[in-house]
Image (cartoon, grey):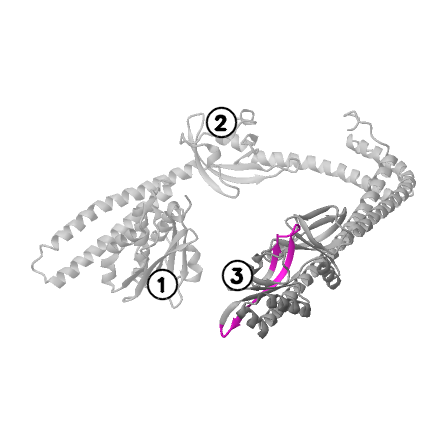
Amino acid sequence: MNRRSGLVPFRLSVQMVLSIVALVILAAAAVGLPAIWFIRSQLDRQAWSLLDQGSQATRALYAARLNDLTNQARLVAQQPGLRERVGENIQPDLADFLHLQQSGTGLDLVVVCDVNQQPLAQTDTTITGEVCRSSTVGFYLDPSAPLPRLWMVASQPIRSDAASQGKVVVGNLLNDRFALQMRNQTGLEQVLMANGQLLASSLPGEATTMAAVTPQPESPAPLASQGLQRGHFSMNDQPYDAYSFFLGDSGAMNLVLLPVSDLASIQRQLTWGMAASILAVVALGSIAGVLLSRRISRPLADLANAAAALRKGDLVSPVAVKTNVPEIALVGYTLEDARAALQHNLTQLGQEKAWMDHLLESIVEGIVTMDQHGRITFFSQGAERITGLKQSQVIGRYCDDIFRPVEANERFSQLMPAPGRQQKIALALRSGRQVTLDVTGAKLAPLEAGIARVVLVLRDVSDQEAVHRLLGDFLANISHEFRTPLSALAASIELLLDQLPDLSLAELQQLLNSLHLGIRSLQTLIDNLLEGASIETGHFRVYPRPTSLRDIIDEAIHMMQPLLDKYGQHLVVDVSPDLPQIQADPRRTAQVFVNLLSNAIKYGPAEAVISVTAAEDDGDLKISVADRGPGIPPEQVGHVFRRFVYLGTGDERAQSGIGLGLSVVKAIVEAQGGQVGVANRPGGGAVFWFTLPIVASERGDL
């Protein structure tokens, strides 16, 4: 293949050496790179863990200092001498008193504010009066100095006889000395910044260059919820990993720093050491590859020549390879066995192909195969006999061009059955004759293609269809012949109900109700005969439209109420008025209810209760009709919806009918896209159920 494409292949020994070197490099990289990544990630994780602990300790120290500062403010505010001096407004004595309190408590700032939040006296005259209007406990950024100063402040009210005399504000300046104290307590460097300006630092030397925290995109989300920000910080060209958090509402930020220059040096040393190890392993692997290739390449070349001969179709020459390498010798023996087996299999395949060709040609049914595009790839003699077409006329052509359905607006490819299904299709042949084919579909995936092909088995059922149509027409004609006189009889009976004065009202009502029930039963029987005939002949059609289930049930109850009254049975309808509309043929669906209610009345005892329920079920409406009859024998559960099936219950009323009602129910429901079923009811009786689709707009599909 390489010679045909113009490429010059490498020698086998060179390929083996290159392959071994590549494998060694991949193996070393597969081991070394994850190790480097793991160690670096561990170092980073430990560094961030140390910073996390340091930031938590820093915040805890701030909280403790604020608590101490609050206590000191409370002690100063409770001094009797302070209340007296504030009450007398002796400012010189008040200032001396504040300096005395400052020297005794270690505070950097003590301010007394009046009730109007104006300073009366203060130990630090450079701070502005804004400190009197600061929060009770927190941080205060004083912008009055050339370089802003950050204070930690706390205040307490001064009260005399429950009356407020102002408040005391105490504070400590957060400067380099404070940052050094925090570093000594946390073990990590501390930096205080505000608006990009350095306020205090525990770092050695004076800052000449400084960069703020650069947030990391991968910073964990919980940090943000805690007011923390993780990132990098640099000062005097020295890199640091940093956790930063804001100090209250002052706008100032505290940075907890960890130097990372040593960590980067360790990572570089690790990378260079691993790279040197990989190069050493590659060199040793290359030497081993050269030695191994010399031992293997010669017998492999013999095997390559033998394989080339097999590819050319030489199955006679034996494969002989001389080598001291057991694995290569085993390959040679295996190749020789494969040659012999392939020769034997080809002989058998030729015989089997001839037999299969003979078998396909002798099958009466027609067999047609098509590719994924619908083009015919095989056409048996049976298919030729059925269609009158020759194989040479159809091979390579589309099935829609060969098979023409009787209905002009239909295409054969749309009527083909799914794999494992059957479908009757009426075709118009080129000779002008119409045939009805029973078509069975299947999928075929040949080994050489790997793409599934469609297989159709054609059977001519035109004669059987003609017989079925004749039988259906016969039943339909008989039913129509009976229906006309029965309708007239019903009209006459209704007329007699108004004109028989000789009978008592009760007798007359009983007689006419009996006749009326007989006529209703005969009409139901004739309806079922007609539906059975239309189903058998393939002319059965439904016309679904959005309709109310309650209206259909009311119509069926109106038809069946006389029969319910005759046997003293009670009908309970549990159907919510809020149910959505169904997509159904109202007349056909009413016939379903009539047949199910007729069965429930026929098999149920007198004075029994018949229940009708409906509920939504997975996009459909499920309707159930439950009776208290003898139930369905287990051996007949799977046959109740077939034609001419009788349930042997021993009840004389149950013996009436011809066994078409439930088969008509099944046909009507399934034609509307629903399902039917039956189950025995706990406590006796049977529950017949069916489903109908809900109108799409009410189901929310639009």
Quadrant of the snapshot with the N terminus: top right
Question: Does residue 150 belong to the magenta stretch?
Answer: yes
Residue at 52% from the left image edge and 28% from the top image edge: 398
Q: Give the range drawn in magenta.
A: 139-162
Q: Residue furthest left?
A: 501
Q: Can residue 639 be seen in this view?
A: yes
* Left or right of 519 in this view: 105: right
Give x and y (percent) for residue 628. 34, 65
Give x and y (percent) for residue 177. 73, 60
Q: Quadrant of residue 297?
A: top right
Q: Can residue 79 be seen in this view?
A: no
**Dot 1 amino acid type:** Thr
Question: Does residue 161 belong to the magenta stretch?
Answer: yes
Do the residues under discs 1 and 2 have CB atoms within 8 angstroms? Answer: no
Could you classify mark 1 by the number of other residues whose Cα lies within 10 Å: few (under 14), some (14-19), or many (20 or more)?
some
**Dot 3 amino acid type:** Gln
Q: What element carries label 2?
A: helix
Residue of label 2:
401
Residue of label 1:
649
Residue of label 3:
117
Residue at 23% from the left image edge and 62% from the top image edge: 566
* Left or right of 43 in this view: 163: left
Which callout, 3 or 2, points to the residue nearer the camera?
3
- Gap between marks 3 and 2, in whole Å? 100 Å
Q: Is mark 3 on a helix, strand or loop?
A: loop
- Gap between marks 1 and 3, in whole Å? 102 Å
Which callout, 1 or 3, points to the residue nearer the camera?
3
Q: Tell me the chief SS of the magenta region.
A: strand
